Image (spheres, helix red, strand yellow):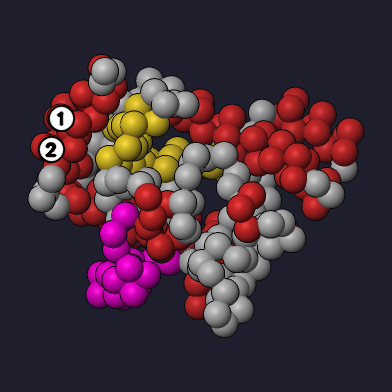
């Protein structure tokens, strides 16, 4: 038997079928005023979505997670984005006491020592702040693309997020990497210059490297781990 969440998700999916990103976002903000949010890491995908939101002046709560270990280039595109669009980007940071306890007990680079340590670091720096950011929201807009990984290729445009009890909208799910880059260029959207240096998926500086020719999209994230363990917990897939 379908749950209430399944029915709600199905109804919303039907309503946005065939709509543009702007029209879908307009619909969500009308259905859930003050309860639509967008999480950005300032990736090229996220910059495309942010441009859509800014161009329409949509009442979407935009936020980012500052883990404390981001690249300086990420902070630079963050600044350039604020200056270009003049829209608020809210910041969520790790809980100080949790982070201090982790570093004091295990050291600043403990995430290299085991998957368990790395996932604990990701939880403190990303997952817990995300849960705070999503509190009270009904729709979470993300920059996920099917091309990011095999797991993400199985996603739908609209997904029910059981962990956070909201709908997750993935407007760029079926966009190619080339389509994203073309949109950035054609619309003069600020982007992280690390993307020009072989970094296709950018996270924390100690956990991200450029990919080599022939490597899959997320090979540069947590490169010392097995491929099937490469998620931080922000997205279940």
Q: In which quadrant of the rendered image does the N terminus lie? A: top left
Place of residue 44 in the rendered image (x, y in percent of width and height, measured from the top left): 41, 63
- Look at the numbered discs 1 and 2 and tell me whether their residues touch, using CB distance below 8 Å: yes
User: Of 211 and 47, which appears nearest the observer?
Assistant: 211
Vertical arrangement, residue 158 with respect to residue 209, above or below: above
Residue reaching furthest to the front: 1
The label on residue 11 is 1
User: Of 112 and 129, which appears nearest the observer?
Assistant: 112
Place of residue 192 in the rendered image (x, y in percent of width and height, measured from the top left): 49, 66
| Left or right position of 87 against 122 | left
| Left or right position of 24 against 40 | left
Q: Secondary structure at mark 2?
A: helix
- Give the magenta range: 173-191
Q: Secondary structure at mark 1?
A: helix
Residue 139, quarter of picture = top left
Residue 149 visible? The answer is yes
Q: Dot 1, how many residues are within 10 Å of its Cα: few (below 14), some (14-19), or many (20+)?
A: few
The label on residue 14 is 2
Residue 164, quarter of picture = top left
Report if residue 211 lies within the magenta region: no
């Amino acid at each position: 038997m379908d749950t209430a969440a399944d029915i709600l998700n199905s109804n919303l999916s039907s309503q946005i079928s065939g709509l543009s990103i702007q029209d879908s976002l307009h619909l969500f903000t009308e259905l859930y005023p003050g309860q639509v949010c967008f999480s950005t890491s300032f990736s090229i995908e996220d910059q495309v979505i942010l441009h859509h939101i800014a161009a329409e002046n949509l009442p979407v709560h935009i936020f980012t997670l500052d883990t404390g270990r981001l690249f300086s280039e990420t902070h630079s595109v963050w600044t350039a984005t604020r200056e270009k669009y003049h829209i608020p980007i809210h910041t969520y940071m790790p809980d100080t006491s949790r982070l201090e306890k982790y570093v004091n007990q295990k050291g600043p680079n403990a995430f290299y020592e085991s998957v368990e340590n790395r996932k604990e670091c990701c939880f403190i720096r990303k997952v817990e702040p995300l849960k705070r950011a999503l509190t009270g929201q009904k729709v979470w807009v993300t920059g996920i693309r099917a091309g990011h990984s095999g797991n993400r290729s199985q996603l739908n445009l609209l997904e029910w997020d059981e962990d956070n009890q909201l709908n997750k909208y993935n407007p760029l799910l079926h966009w190619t990497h080339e389509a994203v880059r073309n949109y950035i260029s054609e619309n003069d959207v600020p982007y992280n210059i690390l993307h020009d240096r072989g970094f296709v998926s950018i996270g924390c500086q100690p956990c991200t490297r450029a990919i080599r020719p022939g490597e899959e999209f997320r090979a540069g994230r947590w490169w010392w781990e097995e491929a099937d363990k490469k998620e931080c917990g922000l997205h279940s897939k």
